[in-house]
Image (spheres, rainbow, N blue to C red):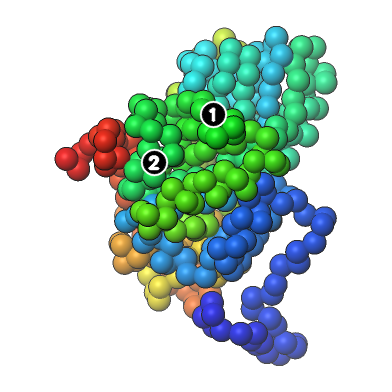
Amino acid sequence: MTLDEGPLTLDDGLGAVVPDPRILLYPRLRKSPFFWASRRHGVAMYSVYNHTYHPRHYGDPVAEYWALLNGVTLWDVGVERQIEITGPDAFEFTNMLVPRDLTKCEVGQCKYVFITGEDGGILNDPVLLRLGENHFWLSLADSDILLWARGLAINSGLDVTVEEADVGPVQVQGPLSGQVMAAIFGDGVFDIGYYRLQEYELDGMEVIVSRTGYTAELGFEIYVKNASRDGVRLWETVWAAGEPFGMRVIGPCHMRRIEAGILAHGCDITFDTNPFEVGMGYDWMVDLEQEADFIGKAALTRIKEQGVSRRLAGVEIGGAPLGTFNDGSMIEAFPVWRGGERVGEVTSACFSPRLERNIGFAMVPTELSDIGTELDIETPAGIVPAVVVPKPFVDPTKDTPKQAFVAGNGHPATEN
């Protein structure tokens, strides 16, 4: 079945199966501040993320992938709800939530962080924005961290306020993103460093621009305040600026994020996985030497000392080309086999158009995570051979998103 074919049913012996059932649009689920704007571009598939409709693609995920790599793209990521933490004790409280040492996070800086539970499990992996000495946003992945943080705050004894801000982000990503952003904000936008932010007023709208994204490509995020009022107007402003550059509206490009080794909460990381299992136990990401007694510190100290029994490995997968991950082709994790025994599972996988092979992440026993280890993976088409390979699969040092821009043309400095 292709994406543009009409209704199709399959018979599994028990009755008709609709392989691509519709998602119900109704009041019970939340709408992004950009819902009505992005919908006009032909959303072909939604999922639900943070109780909110999330555009997954607009009909052709592979074409969206190439637009991201070669041009400029606009994403509705208003599902990334912003948890705002303020008050005299906001720094102390936020530093308690995450394993990173926030004394090393300056005002105006962003950090990719984990929020860990008391057992060291990963409850969420947001981007943290530090807007003031005691003012933070957590740009959330998909889990109910607002409830977790509010529950902790009530019994913390700290003077802190935790609430959901009326803020919505869009992403502008791709090699031409700089030109579009300069058309909106001027050449000063090029001065924003990687994982840094800057506040702007744009035609009466209050926005924050950051050099962040879910692509490992050049790109920015624009966070609009008063999003319930100004979200659609921001979208239209960005779209008008982007049209001369061939901007395309796309969904989250999972092929590119898998190439980049970017993890998805709920798939590659869950409440039951810890930073050391997923290869993110770096001293700067899980700082066990810091003075702050963050939640999960004792458990993560013990895990580091004892070691882990499983790891998330990169794998190349044989067989016919897989789907794009965001096309509904990977309903469940793929079982991983070794010597006739099931030993793990593939948590994310796709066919990489530029690498021209199937790639993914597999959670396997530590002894089977070494480069070159041969495995068997059960895909929808059957059991196929696989091999453990390094990840990320593309640009492992993230040189692409870290590039500087040349003022005046918006091109990466390395191209000139």
244 w.r.t. 271: above or below: below
Query: Residue placed at 80% from the left, 12% from the top?
Result: 157
In the foreground, 235 or 303: 235
How packed mark 2 is, by other alpha carbons closer than 10 Å (few <14, some 14-19, many 20 or more), is some
Q: Is residue 90 visible?
A: yes
Q: Indicate which disc residue 141 carries.
A: none
95 w.r.t. 71: above or below: above
| Residue located beneath label 2 in the image | 183
Query: Residue placed at 67% from the left, 46% from the top?
Result: 33
Residue furthest to the front in view is 203
- The picture places residue 339, in percent across and down from the top left corner, at 46, 65
171 w.r.t. 59: above or below: above
- The picture places residue 172, in percent across and down from the top left corner, at 45, 46
Seen in the image, is 416 located left or right of residue 252?
Answer: left
Residue furthest to the left in view is 416
Q: Quadrant of the C terminus?
A: top left
Image quarter of residue 272: top right
Q: CA distance from mark 2 to mark 1?
A: 14 Å
Tell me whether the residue at label 2 lies in contact with that at label 1, contact meaning CB atoms closer than 8 angstroms: no
What is the three-letter code of the residue carrying label 2? Ala
**Count of numbered circles in the view:** 2
379 w.r.t. 187: above or below: below
Query: Residue placed at 71% from the left, 67% from the top?
Result: 23
| Residue located beneath label 1 in the image | 201
In the foreground, 243 or 172: 243
- The picture places residue 409, in percent across and down from the top left corner, at 26, 40
How packed mark 1 is, by other alpha carbons closer than 10 Å (few <14, some 14-19, many 20 or more), is few
Label 2 secondary element: helix
